[in-house]
Image: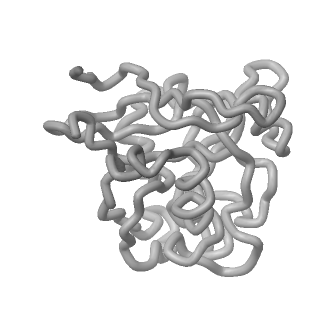
Amino acid sequence: MQVKAGEYVKFGSYPQNNGSAREPIEWLVLEVNGDEAFLVSRYGLECKQYHSGGSITWEDCDLRRWLNNDFLKEAFSPEEQSRIKLSDVVNDNNRQYGTSGGRYTLDRVFCLSLAEAEQYFLDESESQCRPASYARNQGAWADDGTGCCYWWLRSPGSSQGHAAYVDTDGAVYPFGDFVNIDYHAVRPALRLIWNL
């Protein structure tokens, strides 16, 4: 089966509606390179702090640890995990404020960076995201008008105590928000070996 950028595919499962029943995760295909598909979840799947507090980079933050441990094991079977590529994750400095992005990392699951959000979402309407009911129950805030949520990016914000995010209207915010804010949703991203 071939996939194309802009399509939605299902892979893995996670609680999404009210209750704890797991349901197939829908992913937006951002890019296809041979047998490798770059995916980001269609919906905000969880509500998590970027970090519990203080100065931090992506390498050492709580959100990265959760995505590559708890989420990875809960959302994907061992066979599915074997199809998720260990990605070289680039952690650039914040281009506007110069805040250090820290060292590059090797991750199976991660958040998009500022650069990736701007590269793959050419219009703010494309980067708007609705939280799953489960994420809302976990505390993800959603705009009453649009139903859309804030969602984390992995890039640093204006300081090491801030992380960049996407607003409810789809605008990217390089200034960021405090890393311990507890009402932003999480849109996991990964590279899937499609024809394994």
Q: Residue at point 59% right, 56% down?
A: 164
Question: Residue 96's x, y, as percent?
Answer: 48, 62
Image quarter of residue 52: bottom right
* Extreme residue in the left direction: 34
* Extreme residue in the front direction: 78
Colour scheme of this structure image? one colour
Image quarter of residue 48: bottom right
Q: Is residue 173 visible?
A: yes
Q: Is residue 111 above or below residue 147?
A: below
> Can you say which quadrant of the picture contains the C terminus?
top left
Q: Residue at point 63% right, 38% down?
A: 14
Q: Residue at point 36% right, 30% down?
A: 29
Q: Nearer the viewer, residue 17 or 179?
A: 17
Q: Is residue 163 visible?
A: no
Q: Is residue 16 above or below residue 189?
A: above
Q: Is residue 139 left or right of residue 16?
A: right
Mark count: 0
> Can you say which quadrant of the picture contains the N terminus?
top left
Q: Is residue 170 left or right of residue 179?
A: left
Q: Residue at point 58% right, 68% down?
A: 65
Question: Residue 179's x, y, as percent?
Answer: 70, 66
Question: Residue 71's x, y, as percent?
Answer: 60, 53
Image quarter of residue 35: top left
Question: Residue 106's x, y, as percent?
Answer: 36, 68
Q: Is residue 81 left or right of residue 60?
A: left
